[in-house]
Image: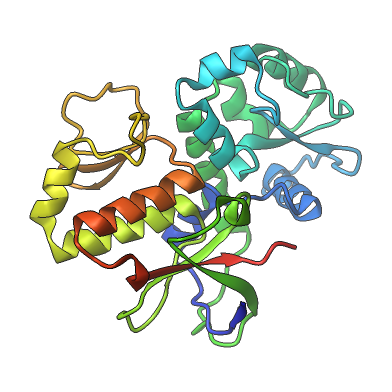
Amino acid sequence: MYDLKTHDEIPSDYHFVNNLLTMDIYRQRKVAKYMLSKLENYNFKEQILTDELTVEHVMPQTLTASWRKMLGNNHEEIHENYLHTLGNLTLTGYNSTLSNKSFDEKKETLIKYSKANHLNKDILNCEIWNEKNIITRTKRLGEEILKIFEVPEHDGRGLRFEAVEEFDLNYNYEEIKGRRAFSIKFIDMDKEIKTNNFRNMLIEVIHILDNIDSRKMDDIAADLFNPWESGKNDKISNFEGLPNNQYHQKLRDNLYLVGGFSSAGVIESIRKLMNLYNIDENQFVFYLRVSE
């Protein structure tokens, strides 16, 4: 069953940049190219011609052994979450031949053929290309977008329609695979919470449950909660004893989200957290955008 959401809030600058971290920009190629072109030429007297340039991935669409090694143990989650995001995209004029080359080879190609010096400066300054560096670049570009496209204050009413589909925790993974998150709702809540991606969906649920019982959440973090019985790198943690190089996001003191978390990992985590808090799974629903 499809719904139309008619009263979106205009996101704050923080939420805009945060949502860019895992937003699929590549799917709408013309928008992606326009955005990257504006970023490259904004505030520079010497403009580069972008008509013949194409949008390319830094981390490739197909991972080779060298890329899997560079990304680390959770390369699958990183690839799923960040492949098509702004921080992993650039412009090049070399007829799409960045392909799945190694990172060092891609840097050589960008130096020789791209000419998008502003877009590529942080790529070329990196020794490796991983989750942390993609996120850092997305944040930089996101802050620049806010300067380029200033939005006047608005109450947000009546701005757009969103076609979405409702799911509960008894979902079929094939139905949500590759879909974009829109919002979540606990049945007894007055309104939905916009999330825009699966990782933020989990973060919002953690905050809600933490407000209900922070001691229980502390116990969960101390036990290095993870959604899978086999124990993946994805965890809710108090961060004690974890490797310093493992990507993490601080939610509050002694509470961190560690790892990439795939869409399936997010939903399985929410299911298990609901059970740990003795909340009926039927109390939770989430909305995904209808596939185009």
Image spot of residue 211 (x, y percent): 17, 64
Residue placed most toward the observer, 259 or 54: 259
Image spot of residue 35 (x, y percent): 71, 51
The C terminus - image quarter: bottom right
Residue placed most toward the observer, 127 or 166: 166
From what the image shows, is residue 83 above or below residue 286? above
Quarter where residue 124 is shown: top right
Horizontal relation, residue 105 to residue 211: left or right: right
Q: Is residue 127 visible?
A: no
From what the image shows, is residue 46 above or below residue 11? above
Colour scheme employed for the rendering of this structure = rainbow
Q: Residue furthest bottom?
A: 158
Horizontal relation, residue 66 to residue 282: left or right: right
**Residue lying at 35% horizontally and 55% vertically, measured from the top left:** 270
Image spot of residue 83 (x, y percent): 62, 37
Q: Residue furthest left?
A: 215
Residue placed most toward the observer, 184 or 55: 184
Q: Is residue 165 visible?
A: yes
The N terminus - image quarter: bottom right
**Residue lying at 55% horizontally and 56% vertically, measured from the top left:** 172
**Residue lying at 60% horizontally and 18% vertically, measured from the top left:** 67
How many callouts does the rendering have?
0
Image spot of residue 88 (x, y percent): 62, 36
